[in-house]
Image (cartoon, rainbow, N blue to C red):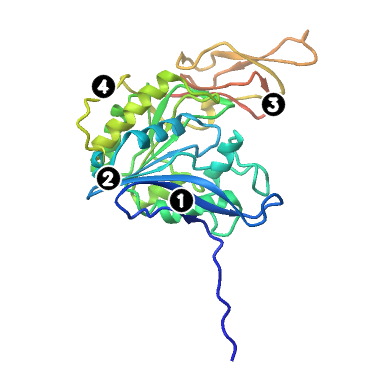
């Protein structure tokens, strides 16, 4: 009589019990057999504060590995808060794309392509590459638990953003009103409102489930600015209190900026490089520009006596993002503008 062979799982596993009350931390273990470590695993930090009944908030940093503001804010919240401050649960993933974060890169160097972007690989695969397994764990083990998600992005080394917070309207009057309130409470200079959902992203997994999803662009350029970190940290606490999961008596400062509402844009609002060279911008982040206005120049690296190519804005608005490195290649995003929200 033959006996079935028991199966051993190589799927990601979590060291902490997310259903347990109290303050807990540990790792999600991502199985990774490499030349250096045949039976090893990769550590993905995870923390939880749970107490009583209430909503479940999920705070995420480093969805892209070179975005550091969200990591700092997530770490700070976990270290500051205690179970008595919480009614419900806050789950923290400070470095969602941990391999990319450890490498100081936007994308993970450990996958087959060497350039795995976590936020383009959802819903992931239980037995795929390391980044696919991270996406699978978040999709199957974290997304079902959460009521509201705060995905703290900040552009990374190649781009700098005028700080913003972004929501997608859901068509649910109560939830949309709460999200609009979050835009005000977060305290960023810009509040972006849209309704598009992109497949293969984290938001693409969350929004079809009618769960609240808020994302940010908190500067970038591969660094942490104290003024951005400060208002965003306070803004997160104001939003968590509005959600009902944060129950402290702390008197929080009022939002540091009066939010200017902008619409989510694509297409003509981008300015791309159409040649390789040195990018020289002539406008700054946060400035208002007109259709056709001069944006900058691209200088030829090897023929500096040639007249530089002029760059112009296709669509006016506020300058939302700008390329950080001066050297550019054809296809690089150099600028992106936002127009006013009229909803």
- Which of the marked residues, 3 or 2, is nearer the chain's N terminus? 2
Query: For residue 172, which numbered disc appears in the image?
Result: 2
Distance of mark 1 from mark 3, alpha carbons?
Answer: 34 Å
Query: For residue 138, which numbered disc appears in the image?
Result: 1
Distance of mark 1 from mark 4, alpha carbons?
Answer: 33 Å
Residue farthest to the left, as pictured: 249
Query: For residue 224, which numbered disc appears in the image?
Result: none
- Left or right for 178, reference 61: left
The residue pinned by badge 3 equals 329
Distance of mark 3 from mark 4, alpha carbons?
Answer: 43 Å
What residue do we see at 29% from left, 36% from top?
Answer: 240
- Which of the marked residues, 1 or 4, is nearer the chain's N terminus? 1
x and y percentages locating residue 218 in the rendered image: 44, 27
Among the 4 quarters of the image, the one containing residue 214: top left
Is the residue marked by circle 1 packed among few (<14), some (14-19), or many (20+) residues within 10 Å?
some
The residue pinned by badge 4 equals 253
Residue farthest to the bottom, as pictured: 1
Q: Tell me: residue 321, above or below residue 10.
A: above
- Left or right for 330, reference 282: right
């Amino acid at each position: 009589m033959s006996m079935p062979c028991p199966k051993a799982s190589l799927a990601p596993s979590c060291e902490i019990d997310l259903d347990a009350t109290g303050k807990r931390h540990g790792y999600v273990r991502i199985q990774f057999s490499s030349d250096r470590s045949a039976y090893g695993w990769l550590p993905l930090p995870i923390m939880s504060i749970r107490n009583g009944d209430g909503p479940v908030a999920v705070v995420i940093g480093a969805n892209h590995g070179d975005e550091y503001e969200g990591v700092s804010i997530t770490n700070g919240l976990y270290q500051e808060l205690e179970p008595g401050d919480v009614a419900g649960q806050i789950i923290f993933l400070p470095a969602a794309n941990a391999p990319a974060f450890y490498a100081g890169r936007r994308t993970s160097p450990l996958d087959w392509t060497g350039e795995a972007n976590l936020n383009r690989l959802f819903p992931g695969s239980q037995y795929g590459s390391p980044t696919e397994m991270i996406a699978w764990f978040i999709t199957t083990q974290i997304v079902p638990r959460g009521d509201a998600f705060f995905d703290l992005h900040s552009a990374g080394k190649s781009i700098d953003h005028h700080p913003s917070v972004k929501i997608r309207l859901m068509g649910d009057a109560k939830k949309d009103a709460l999200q609009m309130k979050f835009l005000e409470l977060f305290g960023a200079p810009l509040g972006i409102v849209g309704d598009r959902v992109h497949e293969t992203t984290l938001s693409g997994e969350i929004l079809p489930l009618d769960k609240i999803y808020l994302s940010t662009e908190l500067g970038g350029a591969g660094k942490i600015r104290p003024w951005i970190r400060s208002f965003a940290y306070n803004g997160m606490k104001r939003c968590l209190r509005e959600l009902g999961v944060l129950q402290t008596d702390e008197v929080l400062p009022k939002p540091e900026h009066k939010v200017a509402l902008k619409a989510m844009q694509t297409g003509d609002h981008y300015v791309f490089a159409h040649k390789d060279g040195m990018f020289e911008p002539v406008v700054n982040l946060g400035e208002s520009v007109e259709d056709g206005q001069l944006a900058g120049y691209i200088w030829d690296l090897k023929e500096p006596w040639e007249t530089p190519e002029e760059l112009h804005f296709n669509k006016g608005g506020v300058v939302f993002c700008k390329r950080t490195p001066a050297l550019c290649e054809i296809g690089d995003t150099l600028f992106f503008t936002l127009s006013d929200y009229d909803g």
